[in-house]
Amino acid sequence: MKLSNTQTELLRRLMSGASVAASSLRNDLVEELLGEGLLTTRDHGSRRSYAAIDTVALGAFVESHFGGLKIVDKVRLTRAEIASETGDSKLVMVRSCPGFPVNTYEPISCMLNGQEFMVNPKEGSFLFVADWQSFLVPDDVVVVGIENMENFRMIRQQRKLFEQCIGTVLLLFVSRYPQSMDLRSWLQKIPNRYVHFGDFDLAGINIFLTEFHAHLGDRSSFLISQDIEERIAKGSLERYNDQYMRYSRITSDIIEVQALIDLINKYHRCYDQEGYIESVYMSV
């Protein structure tokens, strides 16, 4: 997506914490930022404006999707360095929390900064890897990216699903929240197989194809359950209609993914991945 100077300046204002008039932002840009959960709407009588829910997350997303658009030129400048020079760590926007969350329901011996790092969070918790450049996992571990944080937190209630779709292998679960290029950059550095678990809708498929498969190639795949047709047949018609105009032309040369696209278009419905938490939990 190419941005004009006006749209670029509006994004800068949002990243600095200011609000902007709803009518001033491009519709496709608004849809993308709202879809990623990065903007909130404010009503002022007959007028409406947008503001960032989390300016750090918005800044990370903008940096990864609109290369070169940054709040500061020195990306690795820390808040401590800013504070020591200016006395105000909030003077400019920098990423004070790089990295991504990780989770697993079985202990996995990894490496972090050249030392052994056991990933074994207790149920109800997960870890956050900040020094992701030095984070290494065994080659036989399958990395599973989960779009929704509720699914990410409750992996044990979905274990049956993962074993049916991926097998009884060691799984490391990751999330791309907060929005940034860190997770994808890490995945590009390691040789591990990657499985993407997202919503079963056209937007979710687009995220997989553009954000992951385009960069990871054949070692990436989309998790598709055995009962997906039954679930989509009972899914959300409204969600499908909301997404259709934007994603109606989406196709894939991956046979399984194209079959999923065809199912979604056949029933004109979509299915949220959260639905698997309840069904798996209740079947235990």
Image (cartoon, rainbow, N blue to C red):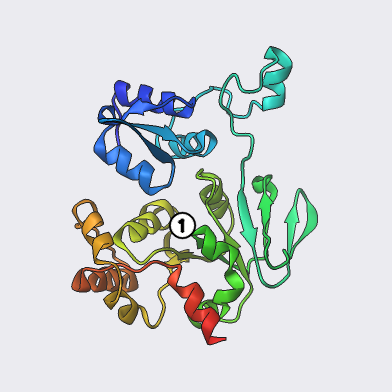
Is residue 209 left or right of 169 when viewed as pictured? left
Farthest residue to the right: give it: 115
Left or right, 130 with reference to 279: right
The answer to whether 119 is drawn above or below residue 28 in the figure is below
- Residue beneath the point at 55% across and 54% down: 187
Horizontal and vertical percent position of residue 210: 37, 52
Total marks placed: 1
Residue 43 position, x and y percent, is: 34, 34
Of 230 and 202, which appears nearest the observer?
230
Residue at the far top in the pictured view: 86
Q: Amino acid at mark 1?
A: Leu
**Residue for point 32% across, 56% down:** 203
Measuring from the top left, give residue 112's x and y in whole percent: 74, 52
The outermost residue toward the front is 45
Q: Quadrant of residue 23?
A: top left
Quick one: which residue is furthest to the bottom in this view?
283
User: Element at badge 1?
Assistant: helix
Q: Nearer the viewer, residue 214 or 160?
A: 160
Q: Residue at x 52, y 65 (%)?
A: 151
- Residue 238 lies, in percent from the top left, at 25, 61
Q: Which residue is mark 1?
A: 216
- Above or below: residue 270 compared with residue 131: below
Q: Is residue 216 above or below residue 163?
A: above
Horizontal arrangement in the rendering, residue 146 relative to residue 66 (left or right):
right
Picture quadrant where residue 94 is located: top right
Q: Which corner quadrant holds the C terminus?
A: bottom right
Quadrant of image for the N terminus: top left
